[in-house]
Image (tube, rainbow, N blue to C red):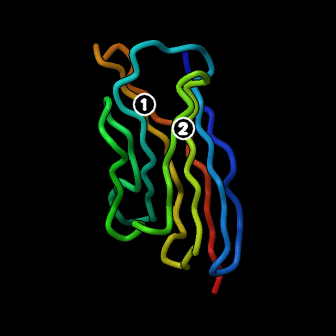
Amino acid sequence: QVQLVESGGGSVQSGGSLRLSCAPSANIPNIYHMGWYRQVPGNERELVAAITGDSGPNYADSVKGRFTVSRDKSKNTLYLQMSSLKPEDTAVYYCWLRTWDGRYDIWGQGTQVTVSS
């Protein structure tokens, strides 16, 4: 079974940076959507940043100007460069992948990001 493997989470002080990576454990063709989402206990999972089809990146208002999402199509790897981190960015970050035909609709296991003030 194909899984999404996430890495790069950790603890950082306010104003610091982290880079998250997400890649499937096997090659998946025809990817339609790859994105980063985050969840705080007691809250719903929310979009952080995503790339869908051939459209440009889509960002949550709260991270615009601070986070950059990018995708290396040759490696099917999605990155999230997070800068100027704030304590309110603390959450578990999840990667999501979906193919055009819906054959693959996969969530990663999540990676913890903790920002201290």
Q: Residue at x 55, y 18 (%)?
A: 2
Residue 19 percent location from the top left of the image: 65, 54
- The numbered disc on residue 74 is none
Q: Residue at x 50, y 61 (%)?
A: 67
* Residue 4 appears in the rendering: no
Amino acid type shown at disc 1? Leu
Q: Is residue 106 left or right of residue 87?
A: left
Q: Nearer the viewer, mark 1 or mark 2?
A: 2
Residue 22 percent location from the top left of the image: 59, 37
Q: Residue at x 39, y 15 (%)?
A: 30
The mark tally for this picture is 2
Mark earlier in primary sequence (1, 2): 2
Q: Is residue 65 left or right of residue 53?
A: right
Residue 65 percent location from the top left of the image: 44, 68
Amino acid type shown at disc 2? Leu
Q: Is residue 37 left or right of residue 77?
A: left
- Please give the residue where the numbered disc 1 appears in the rendered image: 97
The secondary structure type at the circle numbered 2 is strand
Label 2: few (<14), some (14–19) or many (≥20) C-alpha neighbours in 10 Å: many
The secondary structure type at the circle numbered 1 is strand
Task: Name the quadrant of the N terminus.
Answer: top right
Label 1: few (<14), some (14–19) or many (≥20) C-alpha neighbours in 10 Å: many
- Determine whether 95 is above or below 87 in the image: above
- Please give the residue where the numbered disc 2 appears in the rendered image: 78
Q: CA distance from mark 1 to mark 2?
A: 10 Å
Residue 24 percent location from the top left of the image: 57, 25
Q: Is residue 10 left or right of residue 81?
A: right
Quarter location, residue 116: bottom right
